[in-house]
Image: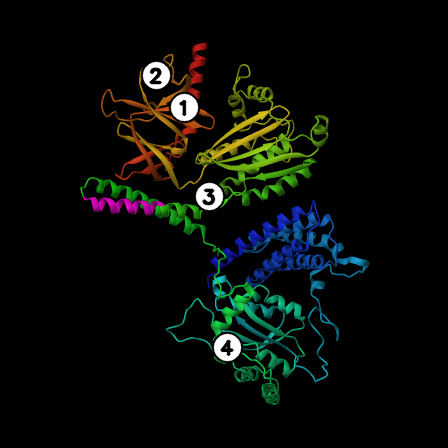
Amino acid sequence: MDLTEVIDAYLVESEELLRDMETILLRTESSLPSDEDLNAIFRAVHTIKGTAGMFGFESTVSFTHVVENLLDELRSHTIEFHSNLTELLLKAKDHLFFLVSEETKGKIPADKITFGQTILDAMKPYLQTKVGGKKENLGSNENFQIQNGEGNQSAEGTKDVSTNENGIGFPNYLISFRPNLNVFSHGLDPISFIGYLKKIGTIISLKTIDQFLPDGSEFDPENCYLGFEIQFQSDKDLETVNKVFNFIEQDSFLHIYPPGFLTTDLVDLANQLPEEEIYLGNVWKEIQVLDEKGFLEYLEEIKSRKTGFQAQSISSTTSSQRFSETASSEQNGFDPNKENIKSITIKVDSKRIDNLINRVGELVVSCANMNQLIGDTEDSNLQESSLLVMRLLNEVREISLKLRMVPIGDSFQKYTRIVRDLGKELEKDIRLITEGNETELDRNIVEKLSDPLTHLVRNACDHGLESSEVRIQNGKPKQGTIKLNAYHEAGSVVIEVSDDGNGISKEKVWQKGIEKGLVTGPVPDSDEDVYKLLFQPGFSTAQKVTNVSGRGVGLDVVYKNIEALRGTITVKSLPKQGSRFILRLPLTLAIIEGFLVAVGNSHFIIPMEMVLECLHFSEEHKADQNQFFALRGNLIPFLRLRDYYPCDRVSQGTRENIVIVRNGEKKAGIVVERLLGEYQTVIKPMGSVFRHVKGVSGSSILGDGNVALIIDVPSLFERTISIENQKLLSHRG
């Protein structure tokens, strides 16, 4: 049986649970956790333990077992929550994340097991000291297994029935297990839970209940029609046996009788099960829960109740499906007689969504080609139909793209922990503020933003913010602030990482650039010319190398990663007030809204969100015969695409046009020959040979089969500025 998909689901769910656990724990640093918080953390660990046990991940199970018991004591207020527990439970969360991800790949290294044990050892003092000063040694895995006492209550809900006044009860457990009809759709395999029973005891006998198995024509392989009656022997208490089924309990009917139950208890159980009472009596007789005498007593008890008390039992005509659906509805609060207005969320493999978007992209190209061919005909009905198809296809494209859009707030969440840990390491009081958490962005971009944002946040903690003492001397609050903000702007997403620290010293940065031989001369007036040095490889203004920074590795990686995402990064800073790093990114990497232009027989696409306007261009529009264009009293740099890419001229004297584009707050012009209008296209990555060509971010296949290059505007900006700087230097020389 291939468990790859199920294990992948386990990894995704565990990651979500641990992320939520971390969020709650970070809140406990400012206020004590509520009962709801403690229950949520307990459920997260408990759920991971249950699923790990189903797959046989023993390292995860043994570690979570101790953590789970500590949390259980906390939520029952047997142990008081202490501030030191936040740090301890965060370490436990980190180690659990490692175990979950690594144990699916194979055996956990011995040093990691040892590290996990040190965390568990640190929990012992809390588990040994309870509220009121009562001592109890619960410090080891072995001691955490609550043992049955001799005739004493061993766990909540478990009573000593071995000496019941009505007689000697049955010596083993009886487990009645009826999975819901839709249990498979939730990624659960009932047989795995039954198999796990063998780890804590012995299955004496088992009977599969197939009374409601449908005929072949009505059989659905995705439904579970079977139930189970199990006689189980174990020296573990009821709580331990119950925990085996905790993960599937909400997706099934489950009843476990501990050793000591009587014949009358079986009649009570029969009234809750969907099968006939006589049928169940024969099943219990078959698995040796009832002997011949006990079976006769069972029948007499049924007869007595029906004649004496008009007992309400489940009708033998009740179908397994109705029982399963009713049980599930009661648990989920669903009333089948009322309209269910609650939205339903399903989890889909991201590769399937990517494949869907790729296919939609191909449809866009094919449809554009079809419209071009139909446009040459005079069939109005055909043209109208093609326009309708194009409109519907655009709607499908919008819907499919939204499937991959996720709120960036989920990504922002992890930086709270990073800021907390760095604050402690650097001995700085830092808080993180996040805004625009609901801003949606392509999931692929969000994933690739993780490293750049981590570098920027770490940089703000170390370089940006001063120590608490310095801040107080400068009249600032003791606590420094880092802000993450996201918002939409002109078809793009803008993400800002800012701090209220000391700001960036232009003089210091420029001097460092001179020392490294990157620049010469006095500090320029343009902030951009100075701050771009920060993104040079090996550039650092740190006075000493620390665990956080000082090696010149970080911002150059940020720049390359943002550039690879077709984005830009700019820096704003004010002395003594702080710094702001501004990232501008496209909404998606799959499809681009572009403006199609042509030079000769070559086609180019300029991202539409950067296009401001288009104008006629002639030589008299040039200012001082330099590469500057006079636009309503302002001079902006421009370039000809023909100067950068080999293009055949259609004819001499072809009229030229200039496309005014925007990069952040700056403008520039791109001179082309023909303006072909807006064009929606699928982005195709460049081949390995052309991947590092400056000024091109990708390509697209047009409807007529020609290839159009997608212009990387920020890269062309840099090239234009570089050329102009070289001209100015040569002129001065």
Q: Which mark is residue 621?
A: 2
Q: CA distance from mark 1 to mark 3?
A: 30 Å
Q: CA distance from mark 4 to mark 3?
A: 47 Å
Residue sitting at x 47%, y 57%:
5
Q: Amino acid at mark 4?
A: Ile
Q: Is residue 727 magenta?
A: no
Tags 1 and 2 in contact by the CB under 8 Å rule? no
Q: Amino acid at mark 3?
A: Asn
Secondary structure under tag 1 reads strand
Q: CA distance from mark 1 to mark 4?
A: 76 Å
Q: Earlier in the sequence, mark 1 or mark 2?
A: 2
Secondary structure under tag 2 reads helix
Q: In front of the other: label 3 or label 2?
A: 2
Q: Which residue carries the number 1 mark? A: 668
Q: Residues within 10 Å of mark 1 (few under 14, many from 20)?
A: many
Q: Which residue carries the number 4 mark? A: 209
Q: Position of residue 217 (x, y in %)?
A: 37, 73
Tags 1 and 4 in contact by the CB under 8 Å rule? no
Q: Earlier in the sequence, mark 1 or mark 3?
A: 3
Residue sitting at x 63%, y 80%:
265
Q: Amino acid at mark 1?
A: Ala
Q: Which mark is residue 444?
A: 3
> Would you say residue 733 is visible in this rendering?
no
Q: Is residue 300 above or below residue 384?
A: below
Q: Earlier in the sequence, mark 3 or mark 2?
A: 3
Q: CA distance from mark 1 to mark 2?
A: 14 Å
Res 552 quadrant in image: top right
Q: Which mark is residue 389?
A: none
